[in-house]
Image: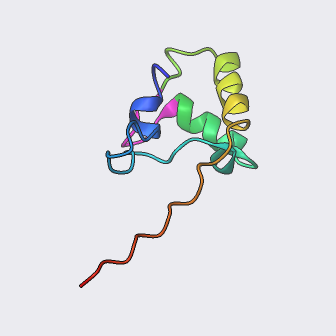
Amino acid sequence: VQHCNLCHWKIQINVPAPFAPILSKAVADGKEAQVKAQIANGSPNMPGYKVMFEPAQIDAIVEYIKTVAPPPPAAPAAPTNR
């Protein structure tokens, strides 16, 4: 919540999509090593957290992400009356 939600979660219904992918098992399953490296080292759009989190904490974050259900698909837009 403190470090990830700002960019990885849609905060309110009327807010556009988040800055980064919504974290869920769809992001992490089968890509644990990539996700761990991303959390530790960051990217041009994300800070690295290896100075903040121990490797075991990063492992725990990835294991948690693997338990989060992906968000439901977006509902199709309602037809407009013209």
Please tell me whether the stretch drawn in magenta is mainly helix, strand or loop. loop
Q: Position of residue 45 (x, y in %)?
A: 37, 42
Q: Position of residue 67 (x, y in %)?
A: 73, 35
Q: In this view, does 24 lie above or below 79?
A: above
Please tell me in which quadrant of the rendered image residue 23 appears.
top right
Which residue ends up furthest to the left in the rendered image?
A: 82
51 w.r.t. 11: above or below: above
**Residue 43 coordinates in the image, percent (x, y):** 43, 41
Query: What residue do we see at 47% from left, 69% from top?
Result: 76
Horizontal arrangement in the rendering, residue 26 relative to residue 22 (left or right): right
Q: Is residue 64 left or right of residue 79?
A: right
Split into 4 quadrants, where in the image is the C terminus? Answer: bottom left
Residue sitting at 67 percent across and 38 percent down? Answer: 68
Residue 7 is one of the magenta-drawn residues: no
Based on the picture, tell me whether residue 45 belongs to the magenta stretch. Answer: yes
State the extent of the magenta-drawn residues as a range: 41-48
